[in-house]
Image: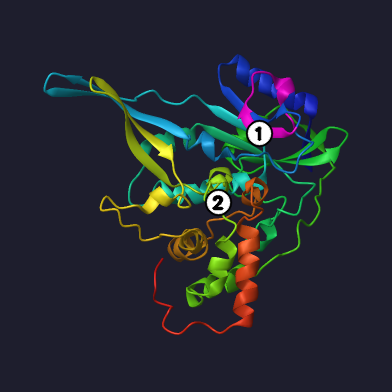
Amino acid sequence: MSQTISLAGIRQLIGQWLGQGKRVAGPIRVNADTILYQNLTSAEALLLDGCVHPGNSIKEFVMPPHEKLYEYVVKGRDVELRNQEAFPPERLILGGRPCDAAALPILDHIFNWDFVDAAYNQRRQALTIVSLACTRQDDACFCTSVGLAPDAVQGSDALLVPLGNDEYEVRCQTPKGEALFAGKCTPSDRQGSVPAGPAKQFDAKQVEALITSQFEAPVWREQALACLGCGACAYGCPTCHCFDIVDEGHAGGGIRARNWDACQFPLFTLHASGHNPRQGQASRQRQRVYHKFHIYPEKFKEYLCTGCGNCVRRCPAGLGLLSVLTAIQQAGAAAPAAKGEEAKQP
């Protein structure tokens, strides 16, 4: 026995949350060509059909692009600090893609590893995620290549599976999901199904081995020739988490803020001395792949990638991880490992 809910029932649920002063986010159409995850001001704005993937990720709801950590005021020779103590309101994300929801357990490792990030954890705990199983894909999608699927449930509190005619099967995964849909669903014998998803584009285990043995291979330079270093791949990625901490203000005071950063920027590794250990885009591109498919999985036993394809869609030069990873696999199959390079680090 399954349980179902109609689109009208989902919109009613949104209205109830908004009426209680809670926040609800989901895919909305910003203009004719752009669909983004954004906060909803009305239930009717939610878009559950019409695109493969929004142009951004739900990462920004737990890791804002610009986050005020605390204020400071200079009073003579003293500096007064004013901490940010407000707890975030409860937030519901409806219609998140499974590849976006799966990124949150990955980010949990990062923000609770050697330092427990209270601000991140407060936003994470206030979040309820209802993902939407994918019924369509495009050439940028590669979730199956990193062990996920169109109906993956990692990171989701509940999964909606389309049944047609604006009806959805509800698959609750956590107590949060069960509490959200309690009394709002209809028992049914109907069960949804989704397509198998994109064909595997590369062997992740093979790529993981190749990027260490082919550290100085020409493929890195070849793949980076078109890279503009704009960071669009990292900013659209649900798992990239690099940030910088800066002071913003004037002589009398200001704020200390955490801002998104990206390893594809030349300034990211620039030393105060003027030396930059990653002087070219090839070494920066290599570092990004190395981090996602070697450093992170070596520590946390999973890849720092969910195959959402946003890096492909957003790249103005037509790159993205997919083309780089397939090129690495092809180069590895064609050439032996460079001797003595296995121990090198980017």
Q: Which comes sooner in the sequence, label 2 or label 1?
A: 1
Residue drawn at point x = 45 percent, y = 52 percent? 263
Q: Position of residue 39 (x, y in %)?
A: 60, 25
The label shown at residue 59 is none
Of residue 191 and residue 288, the one placed in the foreground of this image is 288
| Residue 46 covered by magenta stretch | yes
Q: In which quarter of the image is residue 13?
A: top right
Which quarter of the rendering shows the N terminus? top right
Residue occupied by mark 1: 36
Please tell me in which quadrant of the rendered image residue 67 appears. Answer: top left
Q: How many labels does the image show?
A: 2
Report if the CB atoms under discs 2 and 1 are less than 8 Å apart.
Answer: no
User: Which residue is labeled 2 in the image?
Assistant: 228
Can residue 147 be seen here? The reply is no
Residues in magenta, as a range: 33-47
Amino acid residing under circle 2? Leu
- How much space separates mark 2 and mark 1, taking CA atoms? 24 Å
Task: Please provide percent x and percent y for residue 66.
Answer: 44, 32
- Tell me residue 143's x, y (percent): 67, 56
- Above or below, comparing residue 313 to residue 214 in the picture: above
Badge 2 marks a residue whose secondary structure is loop
Question: Which residue does the image show at 74% across and 21% down from the upper left?
Answer: 44
Q: Which residue is most to the top?
A: 19
Depth check: give the residue in front, 294 or 193. Answer: 294
- Magenta stretch holds residue 174: no
Q: Is residue 258 above or below residue 85?
A: below
Q: Residue placed farthest to the right in the image?
A: 165
